[in-house]
């Protein structure tokens, strides 16, 4: 009889141990909560692409007049663009389609003249 009680107690404690360890796993979702932030950052970085065209003046702002589509994009970094005014360039940027603005990562002289 004592052995039976010992076995039942042991099984009960084992079940309690498993139950407690299962309750400790909610800390994992907190870590998973940071994963979407990393994915968002990665997707923003992946959306940066190359635009080629000429830096031109439009009103009081510099814009990129893209060669292939003849689309004029506003440039968020006017200081970076200023040194290339009137020149053909390659701009690495993300585009905000709602405002037609390029968020410049880098501007370099274009190899195509």
Image (cartoon, helix red, strand yellow):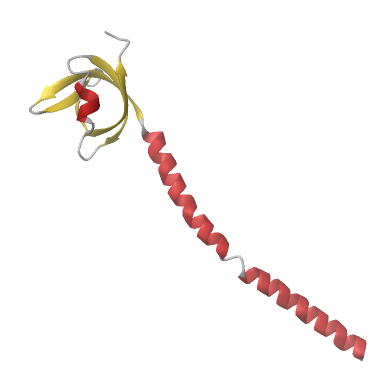
- x and y, in percent, of residue 67 in the image: 24, 17
Q: Quadrant of residue 25?
A: bottom right
- Left or right: 108, with 12 as reference point: left
Vertically, is 73 above or below 9?
A: above
Q: Quadrant of residue 98?
A: top left
Front residue of 70 and 82: 82
Q: Residue at x 76, y 79 (%)?
A: 13
Vertically, is 16 above or below 4?
A: above
Quadrant of the rendering where the C terminus is positioned: top left
Quadrant of the rendering where the N terminus is positioned: bottom right
Q: Residue at x 86, y 88 (%)?
A: 5
- Left or right: 9, with 27 as reference point: right
- x and y, in percent, of residue 101 in the image: 22, 34
- The reply to whether residue 78 is in sight is yes
Farthest bottom residue? 1
Q: Residue at x 32, y 10 (%)?
A: 111
Q: Residue at x 48, y 57 (%)?
A: 33
Q: Quadrant of residue 39?
A: top left
- x and y, in percent, of residue 29 in the image: 53, 61
Front residue of 109 and 10: 109
């Amino acid at each position: 009889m004592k052995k039976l009680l010992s076995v039942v107690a042991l099984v009960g404690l084992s079940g309690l141990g498993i139950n407690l360890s299962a309750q400790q796993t909610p800390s994992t979702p907190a870590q998973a909560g940071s994963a979407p932030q990393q994915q968002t950052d990665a997707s923003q970085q992946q959306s940066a692409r190359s635009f080629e065209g000429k830096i031109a003046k439009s009103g009081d702002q510099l814009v990129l007049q893209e060669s292939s589509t003849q689309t004029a994009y506003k440039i968020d970094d006017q200081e970076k663009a200023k040194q290339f005014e009137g020149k053909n360039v390659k701009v690495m940027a993300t585009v905000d389609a709602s405002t037609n603005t390029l968020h410049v990562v880098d501007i370099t002289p274009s190899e195509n003249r």
